[in-house]
C-alpha cells in the first residue's frame, strides 16, 4: 500500500496537483472562508465527477482522474469565486467535455481548463479572475513574499524538469518580457520586474502553457510554441486597445489558438 502511494506520488500529474494545492493553500485569507472553501469544492468536485462520467461514456473504463484534478485545481484558482454553483459546474463540464470528445486520434486538442473558462465567459459573461495567483505580487521584498513566490513557482519542477517543457516556457517569457519592455519604451529595473514577476504570467507559463497533451515536445516546436503564444497575446491586446475586437482574456485565447496551430495528429 505504501509502495503504491509512493509510485503515485512520482506521477507528474499527481505532483502538479500537489503544487496547485500548495498555491491554493497559500491564498488562504484572500477570500472569505466560506467562499474560499466553496470555490474549491464546486470546481474540483464537479471537474473530477464529470471526467469520470464522460471518460466512462467514451471508454467504458473507470480510472483515477489525475488529469481532472489538475484541471479542477486550475479552475479553482482562476474561476470567479463569486459565481453561483451551476455556472462553475457548467464551466467544469465544458472543460471535461472538450478533453473527452474534442479529440483527434485519441488526443484532445485544446487545453481543457482554458476551454472551460473561455466558454464560461461567452455563456455567462463571467470573468477569468486569476484570484489564486494574482495576489502574490508585491513592490516590497519580504520573507513572506519570497515564500509565496517559491510556492507559486513550484509547478516549474514538474512542467520544466519532469515534463521537459522548459523551451516553451523560456521562449514565452523571453518574448513576453521583450514585448513588455518595448511597449513601455524604456528598459528599467521596474519595467523588468513588472514583466518578470507578474504572478499571473508565471502561473500561466508554468501550469497552463506546457500542458502535456496540447503543447509540443520537440525543442524547436517548443520554442515556436512559446514565441507564438506571446506574439498572439500582443497582437490581440493591440486590437483590443484599438477597439477592433473584444476578447475577455488574451492569454487564454492565444493559448487555444496555438493549441490548434501546433496540434500534432
Image (cartoon, rainbow, N blue to C red):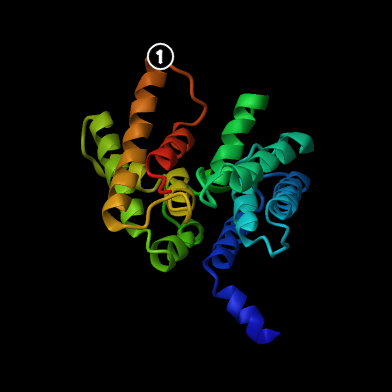
Height in image: 50 above or below 247?
A: below
Query: In this view, which residue lies farthest toward the left?
Result: 186
| Residue indicated by mark 1 | 244
Residue 167 spot, x, y in % from top left: 31, 56
Residue 151 spot, x, y in % from top left: 51, 61
Query: In this view, which residue lies farthest toward the top?
Result: 243
Q: Quadrant of the N terminus?
A: bottom right
Count of numbered circles on the image: 1
Residue 193 spot, x, y in % from top left: 33, 45
Q: Residue at x 69, y 65 (%)?
A: 64
Tell me if mark 1 has few (under 14), some (14-19) or many (20+) residues whose alpha carbon lies within 10 angstroms of its own: few
Height in image: 231 above or below 239?
A: below
Height in image: 249 above or below 47?
A: above
Residue 125 showing in the rendered view: no
Q: Residue at x 42, y 13 (%)?
A: 243
Q: Is residue 204 left or right of residue 180?
A: right
Image-quadrant location for residue 126: top right
Residue 197 spot, x, y in % from top left: 39, 48
Give 193 or 201, whichever is nearer the viewer: 201
Q: Is residue 215 left or right of residue 186?
A: right
Residue 50 showing in the rendered view: yes
Image-quadrant location for residue 84: top right
Give 51 or 145, whichever is nearer the viewer: 51
Q: Secondary structure at mark 1?
A: loop
Q: Residue at x 74, y 40 (%)?
A: 89
Amino acid at each position: 500500500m505504501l509502495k503504491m502511494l509512493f509510485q503515485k506520488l512520482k506521477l507528474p500529474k499527481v505532483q502538479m496537483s500537489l503544487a496547485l494545492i500548495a498555491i491554493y493553500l497559500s491564498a488562504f485569507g484572500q477570500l472569505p472562508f466560506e467562499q474560499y472553501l466553496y470555490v474549491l469544492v464546486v470546481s474540483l468536485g464537479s471537474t473530477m465527477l464529470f471526467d469520470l462520467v464522460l471518460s466512462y461514456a467514451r471508454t467504458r473504463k473507470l480510472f483515477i482522474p489525475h488529469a481532472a484534478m489538475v484541471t479542477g485545481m486550475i479552475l479553482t484558482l482562476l474561476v470567479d469565486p463569486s459565481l453561483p454553483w451551476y455556472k462553475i459546474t457548467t464551466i467544469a463540464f465544458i472543460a471535461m467535455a472538450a478533453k473527452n470528445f474534442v479529440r483527434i486520434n485519441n488526443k484532445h486538442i485544446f487545453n481543457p481548463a482554458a476551454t472551460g473558462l473561455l466558454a464560461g465567459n461567452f455563456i455567462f459573461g463571467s470573468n477569468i479572475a486569476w484570484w489564486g495567483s494574482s495576489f502574490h505580487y508585491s513592490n516590497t521584498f519580504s520573507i513572506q513574499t519570497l515564500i509565496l513566490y517559491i510556492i507559486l513557482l513550484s509547478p516549474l519542477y514538474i512542467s520544466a524538469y519532469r515534463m521537459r517543457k522548459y523551451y516553451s516556457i523560456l521562449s514565452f517569457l523571453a518574448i513576453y518580457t521583450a514585448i513588455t519592455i518595448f511597449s513601455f519604451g524604456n528598459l528599467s529595473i521596474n519595467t523588468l520586474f513588472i514583466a518578470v514577476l507578474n504572478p499571473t504570467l508565471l502561473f500561466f507559463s508554468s501550469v497552463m502553457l506546457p500542458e502535456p497533451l496540447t503543447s509540443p515536445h520537440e525543442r524547436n516546436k517548443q520554442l515556436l510554441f512559446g514565441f507564438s503564444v506571446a506574439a498572439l497575446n500582443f497582437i490581440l491586446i493591440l486590437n483590443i486597445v484599438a477597439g477592433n475586437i473584444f476578447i475577455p482574456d488574451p492569454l487564454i485565447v492565444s493559448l487555444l489558438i496555438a493549441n490548434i496551430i501546433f496540434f500534432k495528429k
